[in-house]
Amino acid sequence: MNSSSVQAPLPVVAPSLDYDRAALELLRAIRGKRSQVLFARRLGYRANPITDWERGVRQPTAREVLRAAQRVRLNVNTAFERLGTLGAPRQDAQGQWQLHEWLVAFCQGRSIVWLAESMQLTRHTVGRWLAGKAHPKLAQFLRLLDVISGRAHDWVAGLVAIESVPTLLPTFRQAQAARNIAFEQPWTEVILRALETTAYREQPELVHTTLAACLGISQAELDSALSGLVDAGILQSSEGGYQVLRELSVDTRVSSDAFGKLQQHWLKVALDRSRRTGTADWFAYNVISLSKADLATVHECLRRAYRETRSIVAASQPCETAALLLMQLVRFT
């Protein structure tokens, strides 16, 4: 069961992706037009490991790839910024990327057991990564990005031209289509969550006939949203209903205007719901005055609650209901 967010999609691993091939393509793209020998010298190697890297005989760690990208002046920060608010990993005094620290934060409290099962690796291997005692190879890192966020293609696109990594190009284009429909038809997010519930899976025809009324939208709006989701490769029409194929990605950095419209949509939905009586919805507000330091603490509490909620949702089974969570802190002075 997945949740949707205006910051990043939740785990969707594409089992058909060849991460080893994607890693080889990315390594070639990072080298660019330089010869393998010149690239090796640029990285400080006396021998030439680049040939083995690009033939798949050996594979560098993700940390070494970050060093290589930085040495040829690729924007490592941009790649990580595309994944969310964590930014790039920290570099120590020797310039070594502390990737394990970043991975711990990026995994958002998911257990080593869950990560190992999702990666089809041993707990020992994953545990050593998170402890900084070993480092994932590039292909493993790409797969881990998809396990956690479904956005390995976004990270790569922030580093090199995505066309130079053709293995990831189809998923990148699908994600773009999904983002477009998420902004153009915001109700698609709720519709997807409804289609994941046990009620829909058990009685899809009944739920389909009542879903528009339940959401407070017209049947035409519902049908249009479903058609858009099918066209974007997020839904597949099946006998008697729809099957969710993958997560709907909403990247808030597309434009401030588009994100503002999305915010306004969900605020209006919440306002309309607050006027109804007899619902199980919960609304609360508190107008406060406090120190700037305590306001910062409150802000962090809300951010932490948001992150913890996402972790709860990601692990929740069975999927029985769909809901909208809004969190807002307004500073007047």
Image (tube, grey):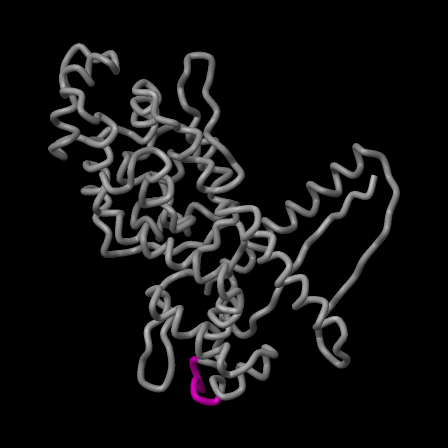
Judge left or right: residue 196 versus residue 325: left
**Residue 97 screen position, x and y as percent:** 41, 23
| Main SS class of the magenta portion in the image | helix
User: In percent of the image, x 22 and y 25: which residue is there?
Assistant: 31
User: In percent of the image, x 52 and y 49: which residue is there?
Assistant: 252
Judge left or right: residue 284 versus residue 264: right
The answer to whether 179 is drawn above or below residue 220 in the figure is above
Q: Is residue 96 magenta?
A: no
Which of the 4 image quarters holds residue 128?
A: top left
* Camera-nearest residue between 324 and 256: 256
**Residue 114 screen position, x and y as percent:** 41, 52
Judge left or right: residue 256 versus residue 48: right
Which of the 4 image quarters holds residue 63?
A: top left
**Residue 298 screen position, x and y as percent:** 75, 43
Report the residue that reaches farthest toward the right: 289
Q: Which quarter of the rendered picture does the C terminus lie within?
A: top right
How many numbered marks appear? Answer: 0
* Camera-nearest residue between 326 and 199: 326
The residues colored magenta run 201-206
Judge left or right: residue 155 versus residue 61: right
**Residue 87 screen position, x and y as percent:** 50, 33
Which of the 4 image quarters holds residue 230?
A: bottom left
Report the residue that reaches farthest toward the front: 257
User: In percent of the image, x 47 and y 44: which residue is there?
Assistant: 107
User: In percent of the image, x 34 and y 25: which residue is there?
Assistant: 74
Q: Is residue 204 magenta?
A: yes
The answer to whether 69 is drawn above or below residue 260 in the figure is above
The answer to whether 215 is drawn above or below residue 287 in the figure is below
